[in-house]
Image: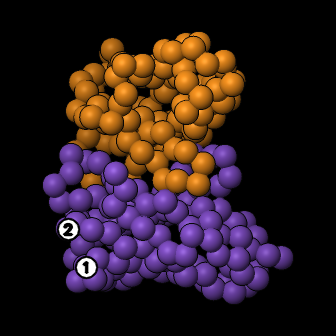
């Protein structure tokens, strides 16, 4: 079963613009993680935000978490062609057995 | 940098044939996951191992799928017989025991059933 829902399903922007993706989930969590997947490849971990954190930065990435709304957002600033990929949020639910529940992803295309 | 290894990268088979996928996790990672990912969707957990023991295989179609991790290191996922609906990416991931941090993924095996 999938807990996370990403929004939008697809996003196409010009290189240099900022990209924002959103994730909603259903249950209480320990943490929420964002992963990137290039076409036909495995997933790469980007950033983890714990339930007691509200914002986290890593390079050009900024993640926010609102546990009252059960939602998170991933902002990529100054996008590059190499950022073209699918982005997934995954939640570590409080009652999980070290498992992640995944959303369906946002497909991001950066146009040169 | 340590990586999760998977083989083969691509597999084409006919329905009713048997297929097997192999995964070697990062050394020292006691937890191993097999996922299935259909194009355009997120990963779906098939089975989770802690060392050589199965923690969760509730989503594994046990009439045709089997998974083992005999020595608690590398793992094999088998499908017999393969069906057209099994066409998907099969991903292996590992993490440190008891860790609520990131999972490390292999490159995946793309299975096409004809």
Q: Which residue is rendered at x = 33% and y = 15% of the image?
A: B71
Horizontal relation, residue A28 to residue A92: left or right: left
Q: Chain of mark 1?
A: A
Picture quarter with the C terminus of chain B = top right
Q: Residues within 10 Å of mark 2 (few under 14, many from 20)?
A: some
Label annotation for residue B111: none
Which chain does orange denote in the image? B
Which chain does purple denote in the image? A
List the single residue furthest toward the right.
A112
| Residue situated in front as seen by the camera: A52 or B37 | B37
Residue B52, how many percent across, how many down?
A: 27, 22
Q: Which residue is mark 1?
A: A67
Q: Residues within 10 Å of mark 1 (few under 14, many from 20)?
A: some
Q: Does the image show residue A69? A: yes
Q: Which residue is mark 2?
A: A28
Q: Chain of mark 2?
A: A
List the single residue furthest toward the bottom.
A17
């Amino acid at each position: 079963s999938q807990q996370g829902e990403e929004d939008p399903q697809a996003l196409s922007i010009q290189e240099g613009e900022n990209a924002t993706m959103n994730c909603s989930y259903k249950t209480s969590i320990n943490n929420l993680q964002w992963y990137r997947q290039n076409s036909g490849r495995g997933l790469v971990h980007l950033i983890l935000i714990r339930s007691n954190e509200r914002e986290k930065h890593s390079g050009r990435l900024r993640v926010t978490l609102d546990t009252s709304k059960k939602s998170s957002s991933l902002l990529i600033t100054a996008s590059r062609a190499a950022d073209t990929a699918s982005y997934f949020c995954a939640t570590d639910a409080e009652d999980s057995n070290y498992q992640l529940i995944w959303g369906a992803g946002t497909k991001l295309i950066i146009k040169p | 940098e340590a990586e999760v290894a998977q083989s083969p990268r691509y597999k084409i088979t006919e329905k009713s044939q048997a297929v097997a996928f192999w995964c070697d996790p990062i050394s020292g990672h006691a937890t191993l996951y097999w996922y299935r990912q259909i194009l355009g969707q997120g990963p779906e957990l098939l089975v989770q191992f802690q060392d050589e023991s199965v923690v969760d295989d509730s989503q594994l179609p046990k009439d045709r799928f089997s998974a083992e991790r005999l020595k608690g290191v590398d793992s094999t996922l088998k499908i017999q017989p393969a069906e057209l609906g099994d066409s998907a990416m099969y991903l292996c991931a590992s993490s440190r025991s008891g860790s609520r941090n990131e999972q490390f993924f292999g490159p995946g095996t793309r299975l096409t059933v004809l």
